[in-house]
Amino acid sequence: MHFSTALIVFLILFVLMFVLKMPIPMGMMTACVFYFIVTGDNPKMVAQQTLKTFYTNYTIIAVPLFIFAANIMNSGKVTDRVFGFAMGFVGRFKGGLGHVNVLASLIFSGMTGSAIADASGLGKMEIDAMRKEGYDDGFSCAITAASATIGPIFPPSIPMVIYSMLSGASVGALFMGGMVPAVLLAIALMVYVALTAHKRNYPVSARYGAKEFLQYTVTAIPAILTPVILLVGIYTGVMTPTEAGAVAGLYALIVAVFGYRVLKWDGFKQVLIDTVKGTGTTSIMIGAAQTISYIVAKEHVAEAVAKFITSFTDNKYVFLLIVNIAILILGMFIDTSVIQVVFVPILLPIAKSFGIDLVHFGLVVIFNMMIGLSTPPFGMLLFITSGVSGTPLKDVIKEIMWPLLTMLIVLVVITYIPEVVLFLPRALMGYAG
C-alpha cells in the first residue's frame, strides 16, 4: 500500500490520540485538521457535507432521543422495578442472582439500547446484592459487564441507528435482527451462571409465591412495556424508528414522573444535561467520521484494503473471520464508537462485494464491538463495574475470561448462520436484503 505524507501524518496523530488519552471526538477532529493543513485542501466542502448530513438525515435524530430515554430510565430508578421482576422470575434457581443479573439486562436493554447505561444503572444494585449473598466480587462484576453487552444488541439500539446511517441498512430490520442474537446471548450467559453456581455452591436467592410474583410483575409492567410499544409501533408502520425514539423518551418520562413518582425537577435537569453532553459527544464524533470518510475516499484506503484482503481470499466466510479477528483486536485497545465510525465505512464496500447482507453484517460488527467493551485491557465495562463496586480490576479481568468465551461462541453462531439474524426480519417484515 502506498501512503501519502498527509495520510501518514493523519495516522500518526490518530494513534497519538489514544497514547495521550485525548478526548476521542476532539482527537479525531485534530487529526483531520492536520491532514488538511498538510494537503492544503480547503475543508469547506467537507464541512458543508457534514452539516448537510445532520440537517437531512432523519434517522440520526433518533440518537439523542434514545439517549434521553436511557437517561430517564437510569435516573428514574426504573431499575429497581426491573430488578424486582427479574428476581421473582429466576431468583428461585441456584445462583439466582446471577440469572437475575442477565435477565434484568435483557429487559433493561429494551428500554435504553446502551451497554453503559445498563452497567452503570443496574450494575451497582446487582453487584451489591450478589455481594450480600456471598458471590465472589470478581464473578459479580464479570457477569454484570458481560450481560450489559446485551443492551445494544436487543432493540432499540443506539449503535444500530448509527450503523444504519453509515450503511443505509434498514433500522427496523436491524432492530428485528438483533432480537434472536440477544436472547441467545442471554441464554448462553445463564448456562454459564448455572454451571458456575453449581461448582461454587452459590445460593438460591428467592422463592416468591404466586401473589408476590404477581405484585412484582404488575409493578414492572410499565417499564417492561417500553420495548413492546416501540417494536409494535415500528413494525406495524405506525411510527418510524426516529418517531419511536421520541415516543420512548416521552413514555419513559411519563412512567418515571407519574407512574413511579421517582423523578423530581432536579433529577430531570440532570437528565437534560447528561443528554446534551451525550448528544454533543456523539455529534462531534459523527462529524469527525464524515471527515475521515472523505480522507479514506480521497486516499483510496478502502480500495487498498479490499485489494489486500481479496489478494489471498475470495471466500466471504474467510472475510468475516478476518473482520471478527480485526475488530476483536481493535476492541482491546480502541473505543467501540471509534471502531464503528472509522473502520466500518472502510469494510462496508468489501462486504457488499462479497454479497454479504448488510443487516447480517451490521449485527456481526455490533455484537463484536460489544464484546470489546468487556475485553481487557481497556474494556469500558470492566472499569465501570470495578469502579461502582470497588473491586480490584485484576479480579474482574480474571473472571471475565469464561463469559468472553461464551460471547465468542454466540458470535461464531451469528456470523456463520445468517438466518439467526435474518429469520425475524424476513418472516415478520418481508425483508429481502
Image (cartoon, rainbow, N blue to C red):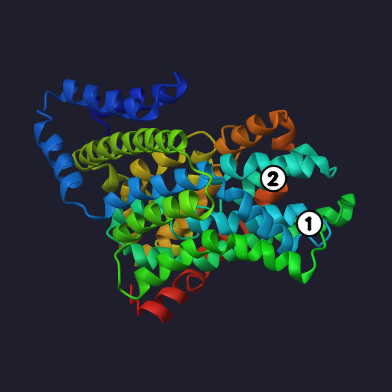
State the quadrant of the C terminus.
bottom left
Q: Which corner quadrant of the image does residue 122 belong to? A: top right
Mark 1, residue position: 96
Q: How many marks?
A: 2
Can you give x and y, in whole percent of width and height, for residue 309 in the image? 39, 51
Work out whether residue 284 or residue 78 is closer to the camera in this orientation and state it: 78
Cα gap from disc 1 to disc 2, whole angstroms? 11 Å
- What amino acid type should be assigned to the residue bearing mark 2? Glu
Instruction: Give whichever of 65, 81 is nearer the camera.
Output: 81
Q: Nearer the viewer, residue 414 or 63?
A: 63
270 horizontally vs 349: left or right:
right
Dot 2: what SS? helix
Determine the secondary structure under disc 1.
helix
Q: Quadrant of residue 171?
A: bottom left
Q: Residue 92: x, y in percent?
A: 81, 62
Q: Position of residue 195 (x, y in %)?
A: 81, 58
Res 315 visible? no
N-terminal label among 1 and 2 = 1
Marking on residue 126: 2
Q: Which amino acid does the dot numbered 1 rest on?
A: Gly
Asked whether residue 377 appears in the rendered view, the answer is yes
Which residue is pictured at 27% across the width and 32% down the height?
3
Mark 2 burial class by Cα count in 10 Å: few <14, some 14-19, many 20+: many
Left or right: 398 as drawn, with respect to 159: right
Q: Quadrant of the N terminus?
A: top left
Instruction: Please give the name of the residue rendered at 64% of the width and 36% of the height, measured from the top-left corner.
Output: 385
**Residue closest to the far top:** 20
